[in-house]
Image (cartoon, helix red, strand yellow):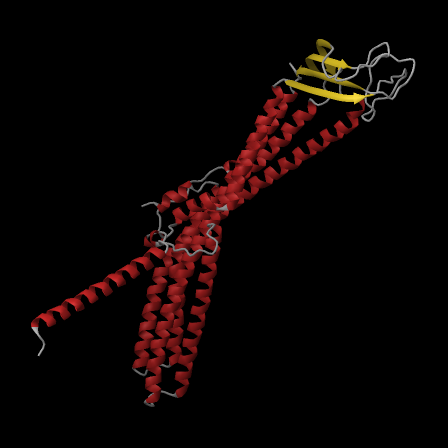
Amino acid sequence: MARPGLSMIRRRVGIGALLIGLAGSISAWAQAAAGQPPESPAFTLDRAMQYALDHYPTVRAALERVNASTAGVSVARAAYLPRLDSLWQSNRATANNIFGQILPQSVIPAMSGPVLTSTSTQSVWGSATGALFSWEPFDFGLRHAAVGQAEAAVAQARAGEALTRLDVQSAVGAAFLGVVAAQRAVAAAQADLDRRDILSRAVHTLVDNQLRPGAEASRADAERAAAQTRLIQAQQTLTLAQTTTARVLGLGTRQMAIDPSRLLEQLPAGDVTAAAPDGHPLAHVHQAAVDLVRAQQDVLARTDLPRVYVQSSVFGRGSGANANGQFDGGADGLGLDRANWAAGVQVVFPNVFDFTSLRARKAAAAASERVEAALYDEALLTIASQQQAAAVMVQTARAIAANTPVQLAAAQQSESQARARYQAGLTSIIEVADAQSLLAQAEVQDQLARVDVWRALLDEAAAQGNLTPFLALLRP
């Protein structure tokens, strides 16, 4: 018989061990939970479309194009500022000057000073420094045209950014709805497989009891296998749709979850507001291209005009050579011996023989303007056609969505009656299989009809060039 004190000690030790083990389990569970990344909230359609705008690389690239073109405007406006160039030069050279002319070139350095009676290989130090201030007070509109060209490039980049945003959001919306449709198709295929499985087991029971011929069991197995194949294909479509959606969202290979509850609860009563074709971002892109070519023509029209400059200069020179032929030694010549200043107006005329090249460039720019104008007209026709087609698709999708519940109810009743007739021995397995196939088709069409309405509304909003009305339909 154990002593009471010893028994109490054992109980305390056991309780302590239990508490230690429980604490260790809680600690391990906490560490495991801390090591797991927190699950991100499921994407709704509007959240997915906004997320793509914030993270998809193409949108970032379009935004940087706008930034680059905006900097180009600053560069063009900087041409209004004057120039101030300066230099310092020190050299060691001989002083053997000579009379005579030399054609302009950039190889032989220029010399100044008298021609000495003799030549020498002795060298001296020379130095020069100066600053040139130059300002163009007026230019007959050339710089203004250059700024206009840069601003037209900014407008084109902004139009491209708006079109990119529309395309990305439309692609994300289409991909998201593709995932929802694939999920609904998987659910319908799974329900069909479950019915086929129940029917197959019931038929096998009847065949085993010799109440039905064995051919009916084979037919039931074949129908079940076909339903299994359709489920596998639906699951493959779902996986591919999820991969596409993750890519357009910029998630890469990361897992994502979607929340389609708002899309499946009820269909929106309203439609997307119609808009004129010329308000579409695609039309803006082509109009911006026309404006850019016209701005280039304005620049070319002012290229062959004179340039007027107001200039002033301050400069100084030093030399170790003297006019009498004597050379100073040491560091003489590194300092400045003479200083001068000058101010005046200079008019620079364009090259007379550039008129042929300039005329060709103007003709090319005019042709480019006609090309862009034609593309703009084509874009308007395309947009108008897409808007009409999208409106028809919305009407058709709504009509189908209103009809599929009737089709589904009739298919459910037909399948129920076929099973009852089969159980009563009044029909064969073929009628039941056909009724179940009809029910499976009706379920898929009913599931997809709601998604197709949202797809049609998305396409209609994209055709109008503004997804804001579509996003408003998503809000409760």
- Name the quadrant containing residue 200: bottom left
Q: Residue at x 44, y 42 (%)?
A: 467
Number of labels in the image equals 0
**99 up-or-down from 108: above or below:** above
| Residue 228 in sight | yes
Q: In front: 132, or 284?
A: 132
Q: Residue furthest bottom?
A: 210
Q: Residue at x 37, y 52 (%)?
A: 40
Q: Residue at x 38, y 88 (%)?
A: 213
How far from the left and from the top, in percent, is residue 13? Answer: 17, 67
How far from the left and from the top, in percent, is residue 350? Answer: 76, 21
Quadrant of the image for the N terminus? bottom left
- Name the quadrant containing residue 469: top left
Q: In front: 465, or 141?
A: 141
**280 up-or-down from 334: above or below:** below
Q: In front: 280, or 85?
A: 85
How far from the left and from the top, in percent, is residue 345? Answer: 71, 11
How far from the left and from the top, in percent, is residue 168? Answer: 49, 46
Q: Give the left or right position of residue 168, taking residue 85 as reference.
A: left
**9 up-or-down from 66: above or below:** below
Q: In front: 356, or 441?
A: 356
- Name the quadrant containing residue 377: top right
Q: Residue at x 87, y 17 (%)?
A: 97
| Residue 393 in sight | no
Q: Residue furthest front?
A: 330
Q: Residue furthest right?
A: 117
**407 up-or-down from 135: above or below:** below
